[in-house]
Image: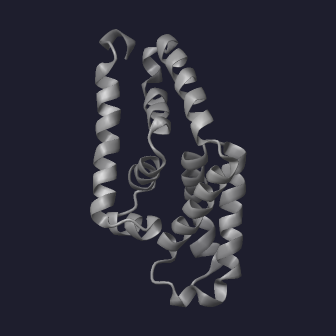
C-alpha cells in the first residue's frame, strides 16, 4: 500500500528540480512541485490503479509546468533574454564555473530536451519511466537525450580552452 509520507513526499525535491528545469523560475517551480503533491493527494484513492506512481508524478508535474510556461507566453521573449545574459556571462566566467556554464547550456535547450536531460541525468529515471512521464516513446527519449548532449558537447568544444 502506498503511503504519502514515505512514497510521495520524497518526490518533492525531484519534482521541484524538474519544474525548475522547465520554468527556469524558482518560485514557480516551488509552486508547481507543491501543486503536483496536492494533485497526487487528491488522487490517493486511485494510487493502486497507477502502474508507476513515480513516473505518474513526473508526468503531472511536467504537464503543469509546460502549461504554465505556455500560458505566460514567455518562451520567445525569455529565450532572447537568456541567450543575451548567457553570452555576457560566458565572456566573464572563471575556470571553476564550468558546471554553471553547462547548467546554462542546458537551460538554453528546447523544452523537451531540457526535460529529458533533467529526468535522465539529474533525477536518474530510466528511459521507460521518462517515456511514461513525458508521453514520448523510448526511442524519442533517447533521440532527444542524444541531441541535447550533443548540443552541450559542441557548445563546450566551441569555447576557447582558456575560457574553460
Q: Is residue 156 left or right of residue 58?
A: left
Residue 96, x across and y down, in percent = 45, 20
Is any part of residue 149 visible from this angle?
A: yes
- Residue 82 screen position, x and y as percent: 57, 29
Which residue is painted at 63% across and 68% down in the image?
Answer: 9
- Residue 1 in sight: no
Relative height, residue 80 to residue 49 (above, below): above
Image vertical order of residue 41 relative to residue 76, above or below: below
Residues 147 and 161: in front is 147
Describe residue 95's horizontal placement relative to residue 143 as left or right: right
Residue at x 57% of width, y 85% of height:
47
Query: Which quadrant, please, contains the C terminus?
Result: top left
**Applied colour scheme:** one colour
Q: Does 62 appear above or below 84?
A: below
Location of residue 95 with respect to 100 vertically, above or below = above
Q: In which image quadrant can residue 130 be found?
A: bottom left
Amino acid at each position: 500500500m502506498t503511503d504519502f509520507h514515505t512514497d510521495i513526499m520524497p518526490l518533492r525535491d525531484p519534482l521541484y528540480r524538474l519544474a525548475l528545469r522547465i520554468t527556469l523560475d524558482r518560485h514557480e517551480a516551488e509552486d508547481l512541485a507543491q501543486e503536483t503533491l496536492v494533485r497526487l493527494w487528491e488522487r490517493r484513492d486511485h494510487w493502486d490503479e497507477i502502474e508507476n506512481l513515480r513516473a505518474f508524478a513526473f508526468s503531472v508535474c511536467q504537464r503543469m509546468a509546460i502549461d504554465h510556461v505556455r500560458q505566460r507566453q514567455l518562451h520567445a521573449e525569455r529565450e532572447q533574454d537568456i541567450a543575451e545574459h548567457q553570452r555576457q556571462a560566458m565572456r566573464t566566467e572563471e575556470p571553476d564555473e564550468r558546471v554553471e556554464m553547462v547548467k546554462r547550456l542546458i537551460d538554453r535547450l528546447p523544452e523537451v530536451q531540457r526535460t529529458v536531460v533533467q529526468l535522465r541525468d539529474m533525477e536518474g529515471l530510466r528511459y521507460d519511466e521518462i517515456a511514461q512521464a513525458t508521453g514520448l516513446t523510448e526511442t524519442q527519449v533517447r533521440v532527444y537525450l542524444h541531441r541535447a548532449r550533443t548540443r552541450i558537447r559542441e557548445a563546450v568544444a566551441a569555447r576557447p580552452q582558456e575560457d574553460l
